[in-house]
């Protein structure tokens, strides 16, 4: 069975089509063309703005023309992560989906259900003439994952409606009414290449096998950061012996917890066995610290001497700064039990042309002042180490509104369907909702979606039964709004 054969057929068949369209962040041309063709096929009014967002408009069911307009919103792009042993070109290759019991996942890559399933649901509403609804809009934004660029630069006339249903949450039977704001902090070291010292044994060390995950929703899951594991080893070596660091890499995206990291380094030949023993000791420590949470795949392999290495001062400062850099939960919310208030993610380290080393971090908080405080904490660590530090523009959070009318409607709709009261929550991950409220402060906004797990990692999966509940819930909310229930 393929996913397009799952039920409800309409939403699954559209999601299947979406998985076949490459859509990395900042490269949404193909998925935008898909959306424009979809609008043409279904005779929908459609418009785009200068940044590349797409809006489609469908008239109300006859007799429901006076109902409030509803915007069904999702983002076009997906996080492109894969296991290192998987050959996949995210710019050109379709996602290969696999059904495993009650779950759908991809073959060694991210699935893109974040937010492909939200897009599919909105498109299914626009295509389904059996539903009862008032005026409906589908709004599909670009570059949500790497900067909320589409929501930040929403064109005039792209947001028409009174109610916005953001379809980008990840837990069925939960309704979200608030989210954290965020900001990125990047730190750049400039190094001097030096001749690799003679008489050294050179190695590559690789830390793999960790779960990774979303740097917002999974940051409190107690998972290991591969970058932290790597520099923990390099730091320990530097305290015991001379180390020639030739190359370092780890993580990939700012909003994903690093799953893999590695380095090429050398130690004096008479210290090579001690270096191996120290790694084995660290592995044992990590397995004890993360027992029941992580499984580590760590390798140390001998390699030929490189031509050059990073100058010792920069290498020392880099490792020290990454080790000192905070990572994980900084504080918990005092208002909502179990909600992370403030966190930071040591996302990636990459070597660039021009003898540069770039360390990328991401900070989140539901309290604006704390967001900047933790960003400045990270900045101070790297500035002390001699790096040049810059901050992104950031984005504001979304303040909960417990008096939301659509929230009450969504709760009643779910109770009618399943005789269960859905949980009402805020989320530590970033959503676009706060930016839409900047455009129209009177919007009534909630966010919900089917159950997803391990998003932003190759272990991303989506619960098949939850998709049907998600679809039924959308349909019932639209009907209740249209009928004034």
Image (cartoon, helix red, strand yellow):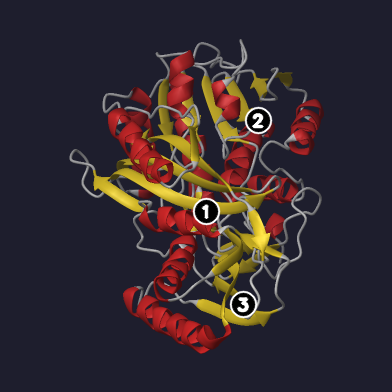
Q: In x, y percent, where is residue 241?
A: 45, 75
In the drawing, does residue 15 fall left or right of residue 212? Answer: right
**Mark seen at residue 314:** 1
Asked whether the beta carbons under mark 2 and mark 3 sit within 8 Å of each other, the answer is no
- Mark with earlier residue (2, 3): 2
Q: CA distance from mark 2 to mark 3?
A: 56 Å
**Residue 369 quadrant:** top left
- Mark with earlier residue (1, 3): 3
Badge 3 marks a residue whose secondary structure is: strand
Q: In x, y percent, where is residue 154?
A: 59, 19
Name which residue lies at 59% across and 61% down.
248
In the drawing, does residue 35 fall left or right of residue 131? Answer: right
- Tell us which disc is closer to us: 1 or 2: 1
**Mark seen at residue 203:** 3
Q: Which residue is mark 2?
A: 126
In the drawing, does residue 140 fall left or right of residue 396? Answer: right
């Amino acid at each position: 069975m393929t996913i397009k054969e799952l039920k409800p057929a309409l939403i699954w068949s559209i999601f299947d089509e979406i998985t076949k369209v490459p859509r990395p962040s900042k490269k949404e041309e193909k998925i935008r063309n898909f959306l424009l063709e979809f609008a043409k096929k279904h005779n929908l009014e459609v418009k785009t703005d200068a940044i590349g967002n797409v809006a489609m408009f469908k008239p109300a069911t006859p007799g429901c023309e006076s109902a409030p307009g509803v915007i069904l919103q999702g983002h076009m792009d997906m996080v492109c992560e894969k296991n290192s042993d998987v050959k996949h070109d995210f710019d050109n290759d379709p996602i290969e989906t696999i059904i495993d019991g009650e779950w759908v996942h991809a073959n060694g890559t991210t699935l893109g259900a974040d937010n492909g399933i939200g897009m599919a649901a909105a498109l299914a509403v626009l295509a389904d003439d059996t539903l009862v609804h008032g005026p409906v809009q589908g709004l599909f934004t670009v570059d949500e994952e790497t900067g909320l660029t589409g929501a930040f630069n929403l064109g005039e006339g792209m947001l028409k409606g009174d109610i916005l249903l953001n379809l980008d949450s990840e837990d069925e039977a939960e309704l979200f009414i608030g989210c954290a704001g965020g900001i990125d902090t990047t730190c750049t070291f400039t190094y001097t290449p030096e001749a690799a010292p003679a008489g050294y044994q050179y190695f590559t060390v690789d830390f793999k096998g960790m779960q990774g995950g979303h740097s917002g929703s999974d940051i409190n899951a107690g998972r290991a950061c591969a970058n932290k594991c790597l520099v923990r080893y390099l730091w320990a070596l530097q305290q015991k012996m001379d180390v020639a660091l030739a190359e370092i890499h780890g993580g990939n995206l700012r909003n994903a917890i690093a799953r893999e990291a590695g380095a090429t380094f050398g130690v004096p030949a008479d210290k090579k066995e001690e270096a191996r023993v120290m790694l084995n000791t660290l592995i044992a420590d990590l397995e004890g610290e993360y027992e029941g949470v992580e499984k580590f795949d760590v390798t140390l392999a001998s390699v030929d001497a490189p031509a050059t290495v990073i100058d010792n001062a920069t290498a020392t400062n880099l490792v020290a700064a990454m080790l000192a850099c905070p990572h994980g939960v900084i504080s918990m919310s005092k208002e909502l039990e179990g909600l992370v208030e403030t966190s930071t993610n040591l996302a990636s380290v990459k070597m660039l042309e021009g003898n540069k080393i770039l360390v990328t971090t991401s900070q989140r908080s539901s309290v604006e002042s704390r967001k900047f405080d933790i960003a400045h904490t990270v900045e101070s660590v790297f500035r002390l180490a001699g790096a040049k530090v810059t901050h992104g523009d950031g984005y504001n959070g979304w303040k909960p509104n417990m008096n939301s009318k659509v929230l009450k409607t969504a709760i009643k709709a779910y109770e009618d369907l399943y005789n269960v009261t859905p949980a009402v929550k805020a989320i530590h991950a970033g959503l676009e909702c706060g930016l839409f409220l900047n455009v129209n402060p009177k919007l009534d906004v909630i966010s919900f979606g089917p159950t997803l797990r391990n998003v932003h990692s190759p272990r991303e999966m989506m619960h098949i039964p939850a998709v049907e509940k998600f679809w039924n819930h959308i349909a019932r909310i639209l009907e209740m709004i249209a009928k004034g229930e």
